[in-house]
Image (spheres, rainbow, N blue to C red):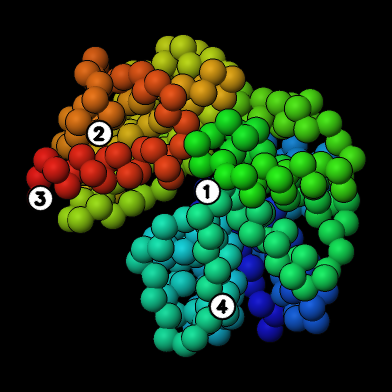
């Protein structure tokens, strides 16, 4: 059976393209590997795949002890495929914190503190002297644009920037033009249901005893989304009840202005005030300069929980 390669649930552009790119690399190195996705392809990713003429991976619902897998763009089991505890994990290529991760067998584990999995993958291509085709370059640069919001996110490192320019040369595209079109393709919210908005890019984090759900939506018009606040509060409240979240945070990020407006619900919603030094008004607040869940939202909430309750 071939090696199954996939990223996290609620796949984003880095997760989808990194699975495709790593499967391609493994195949070129003589291993039988195939990319999968754990959820629907979002509009931003669909734009990138179409632009570079690449098919979306097949959907995978769960894995079993029969499976050998490689994980990209995540390592925490609660963000992975159901059944992951039983599968044999051969490799992890990631750029996130390491948590809730354990294996029985040795593995290749590579996590680097850079802005995107694609930045790590590009290095691995070069280390193995494998050629990066135009399609692969296009996929990897799309991932970097997505994860770094066109190099504007504080998660961006010099390596991401350098890699992005090199990939743009291989793919022969205008970064600014292509990047804005791709980000905008994913930023329309009017055609999405409230459920889609709060689940599209959502991750669960265990913070001490608490279960924190953090959803993020990239937009070009924050107010358009907040006009639907009542509807959002209703579906978020249902999610909190069903999954016993202690805090549900919806981060609405304006990708053109690099700010976010947050909506916080759940028993511990007040922790947001401490985390970002803001006052919540009707459970909402503007977070100036905040665009990164990984580097800003998660660590700030974690610190605030620690100082308030531990
Ligand atoms: Mn991701
Ligand atoms: Mn990523």
Which residue shows up at 65% across the image and 33% down it?
A: 150
Judge the density around disc 2: few (<14), some (14-19), many (≥20) Cα neighbours within 10 Å: many
Say which of marks 1 and 3 sits in front: 3
Query: Which of the image's four quarters has the N terminus?
Result: bottom right
- N-terminal label among 4 and 1: 1
Please name the residue that numbered disc 1 is placed on: 10
In the rendered image, the residue lying farthest to the left is 309
Please name the residue that numbered disc 3 is placed on: 310
The answer for how far apart the CA atoms under marks 1 and 2 are is 25 Å
Which residue shows up at 42% across the image and 80% down it?
A: 103
Residue 142 vs residue 245, the one in the foreground: 142
Please name the residue that numbered disc 2 is placed on: 275
The answer for how far apart the CA atoms under marks 2 and 4 are is 35 Å
- N-terminal label among 3 and 2: 2
The answer for how far apart the CA atoms under marks 3 and 2 are is 15 Å
Judge the density around disc 3: few (<14), some (14-19), many (≥20) Cα neighbours within 10 Å: few
Is 158 above or below relative to 195? below
Residue 100, how many percent across, how many down?
35, 66
Please name the residue that numbered disc 4 is placed on: 108
- N-terminal label among 1 and 2: 1
Residue 268, how many percent across, how many down?
17, 37
């Amino acid at each position: 059976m071939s090696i199954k390669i996939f990223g996290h649930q609620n796949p984003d552009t880095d997760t989808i393209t990194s699975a495709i790119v790593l499967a391609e690399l493994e195949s070129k190195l003589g291993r039988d590997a195939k990319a999968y996705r754990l959820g629907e392809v979002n509009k931003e990713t669909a734009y990138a795949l179409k632009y570079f003429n690449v098919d979306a991976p097949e959907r995978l619902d769960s894995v079993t002890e029969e499976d050998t897998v490689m994980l990209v763009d995540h390592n925490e089991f609660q963000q992975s495929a159901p059944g992951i505890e039983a599968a044999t994990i051969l490799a992890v290529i990631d750029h996130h914190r390491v948590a809730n991760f354990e294996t029985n067998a040795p593995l290749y584990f590579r996590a680097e503190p850079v802005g995107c999995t694609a930045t790590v993958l590009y290095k691995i291509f070069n280390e193995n002297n494998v050629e990066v085709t135009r399609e692969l370059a296009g996929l990897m640069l799309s991932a970097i644009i997505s994860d770094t919001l066109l190099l504007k996110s504080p998660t961006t490192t010099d390596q991401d920037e350098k890699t992005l320019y090199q990939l743009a040369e291989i793919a022969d595209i205008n970064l600014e033009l292509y990047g804005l079109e791709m980000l905008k393709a994913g930023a329309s919210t009017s055609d999405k249901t409230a459920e889609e908005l709060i689940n599209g890019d959502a991750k669960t984090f265990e913070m001490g005893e608490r279960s924190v759900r953090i959803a993020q939506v990239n937009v070009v018009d924050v107010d358009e989304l907040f006009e639907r606040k009542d509807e959002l509060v209703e579906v978020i409240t249902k999610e909190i009840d069903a999954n016993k979240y202690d805090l549900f945070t919806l981060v609405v990020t304006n990708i053109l202005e690099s700010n976010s407006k947050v909506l916080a619900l759940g028993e511990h919603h007040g922790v947001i005030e401490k985390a970002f030094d803001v006052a919540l008004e009707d459970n909402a607040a503007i977070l100036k300069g905040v665009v990164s869940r990984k580097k800003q939202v998660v660590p700030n909430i974690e610190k605030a929980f620690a100082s308030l309750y531990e």
